[in-house]
Amino acid sequence: MQNPGTFIRKPRCCGKFDGENPHRPKPLKKQISMEDLNFRKGDAKTEAFGSNRMLQPSPVEKIPDGPTTPEVAYQMVKDETFAQTQPRLNLATFVTTYMDEYATKLMNEAININYIDETEYPRIAVMNGKCINIVANLWNSPEKDTWKTGALAIGSSEACMLGGVAAWLRWRKKRQAQGKPFDKPNFVISTGFQVVWEKFAQLWQIEMREVPLTLEKTTLDPEEALKMCDENTICIVPIQGVTWTGLNDDVEALDKALDAYNAKTGYDIPIHVDAASGGFILPFLSPETKWDFRLKWVLSISVSGHKFGLVYPGLGWVCWKGKEYLPEEMSFSVNYLGANITQVGLNFSRPAAQILGQYYQFIRLGFQGYKEVQYNSLQIAKYIHSEIAKMVPFVNYSEDVVNPLFIWYLKPEYAKSAKWTLYDLQDKLSQHGWMVPAYTLPSKLEDYVVMRVVVRQGFSRDMADMLLGDINNAIAELEKLEYPTPTRMAQEKNLPVEAKMFNHGGRRKTAKK
C-alpha cells in the first residue's frame, strides 16, 4: 500500500519518455561569454591577493577594460595609500582625524545626501539652521530672531570668503550711494594670514594690506593696522588661532582702537574675525575673553567645523551679527515649517553628512563635553611645549599656549655649530610616521625656521610621549653627524631650502634659514 505522505509525479508526455523533461528549455547552441578578460577563472572566489589583478599595476591613464570584484578594488585603492602617514600622526594638519563610531556610522549613512536638495531633505535644512543657531550663540549673538543669520560652508576657507565678500558688498553699496569710486577696495590683516586670504584678494581683486609680525609684536598690532586703513578699507581681519604660531590677535583692543578711529574719520570700518581654530576653543576654555559679537565692530565671524569643531573634513560656518549685515545679493531663502532658512555659499552641491556629524557632536558632547575635549588637547599641547623647552637645541616661540598648537626653533647659539637643521629633524620624524612641519615664518621673520605641532582630539598623552621620545632619539642621531647636512650647507651659503611639507600658512615661500 502506498504511503499517503508520498506523492509520485508521473511525467506528462505525448510520446516516448526518454528521461528528460520535454518542457525544460533547450540549451543555446552557442553561449555568449561574459568572462572578464582581466582575470583568471575563479577570481571572484579567490582571495584578493591571489587574484590576477593584484599582479597588474593600478590604472594611470585609462579606465580598465573590465570590472573587478569589490574586494579586489577595495584592496587596490587601500594599498595605494598604505604607505602614507596615519592621519592621527599628522601633526601638521588642523583637521579632525578622530570621531567616535556612532558619529562615523551616522555620517556614512548620509554620504549619499546632497544638502542643496532642501525640498527633498527638509529636515537636514532645519538641522543646518539649528547648527547655525548653536554656533552663533556660542559667539554671543545679539540677534533676537528664532533663526540666526549664518551659512554652511565647505571648510573655513569658504566661510572666510563669504565674510569677506559680505564686507566688500556692503562697502561697495555705500560708496555707490555716496557717488564715490569703488574700484580700489582693500582689507587689513597681519602677515600671519592663512592662504585663503591671499585667494580672496586675488579672486575678488581686493588689495591685501599686511601688518608685519615681529618677535616683539607676535600678534596683530591695532595701531599699525589702523595706519593702513582709509576710506577704501572694507574690513580688518584679526585671527583667533594664527596658523603660523597658534597665538590669538587681541580683538578687544582692536575694537576699542577702531571705535575711536571710526569716530574720528567718519568711517564705519568693520571687523571680520577669522576664528578657524579659536572659534571652537575660546567659548569653552576662555568664555570671559571678548573677541566675538559682544564687541561693537565685530559684524561677522568664521570658523572651521572640521578643526576644533570635531567633525571630519569639509565643514565651515560663518555667522553675521544680524540680517542687515548679510547683503541680499548673497542669499536666497527657503521656508519650511515656519523657518526662514537662509542659504549662502560659493558652492552649490555640498555634503549633508558633515551637518549630521556636527549636530551629533553638539548633542553627544554638549558644552561640558566640548570643554573637556578642548581642555585635554590644550593640556597635552602645554605638556609637549614644556618638554620641548627642556631640550638643549630648542626655544619656544612663545611662553604662552593659548590654543592646542605652538611652534619652536633652534637656539641661535646652538644653530651656529649644529650640523643639522629642523628640516633634517622633520625628515627623521617622518621615518617614524610623524608629520611635524618645518617652515619659515612670514615676512620680517623669514630668517626663522620653526616647527609646529597641532594637538587634536584623539592625540593622547601616550602618543605625546612617543613623539617626544622620537624627537630625543632623532636629536641624538643628528648630533653624531660628522659632516653638515645638505640643508645646513644651504643655510650657510644663504641658499633657499624647499620646504617638503605643507604648513597651511599663507604664501608658500622657499625657506632660506
Image: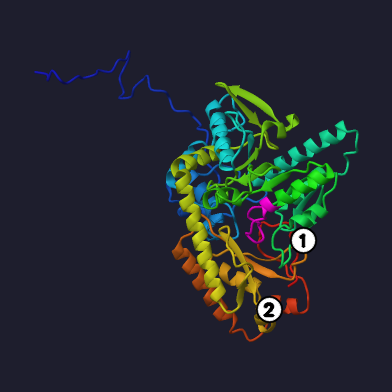
Crowd rating for badge 2 (residues with CA inside 10 Å; few <14, some 14–19, many 20+)? few
**The C terminus, quarter of image:** bottom right
Residue at image point 58% right, 36% down: 132
User: In this picture, is 479 found above or below 452?
Assistant: below
Residue 212's tag is 1
Residue at image point 57% right, 40% down: 135
Q: Position of residue 24 (x, y in %)?
A: 38, 22
SS for callout 2: helix
State the residue lying farthest toward the bottom: 482
Q: Earlier in the sequence, mark 1 or mark 2?
A: 1
**The N terminus, quarter of image:** top left
User: In this picture, is 202 found above or below 498?
Assistant: above
Kindly tell me whether residue 55 is visible in this rendering.
Answer: no
Q: Which residues are magenta?
A: 239-253
Kindly tell me whether residue 261 is visible in this rendering.
Answer: yes
Could you tell me the amino acid type at mark 1?
Answer: Pro
**Which residue is under mark 2?**
412
Camera-nearest label, 1 or 2: 1
Q: Position of residue 349 (x, y in %)?
A: 64, 34
Magenta: predominant secondary structure element? loop
Q: Is 501 on the left or on the right of 265, as rendered?
A: left
| Structural distance between the alpha carbons of marks 1 and 2 | 22 Å
Q: Nearer the viewer, residue 321 or 36?
A: 321
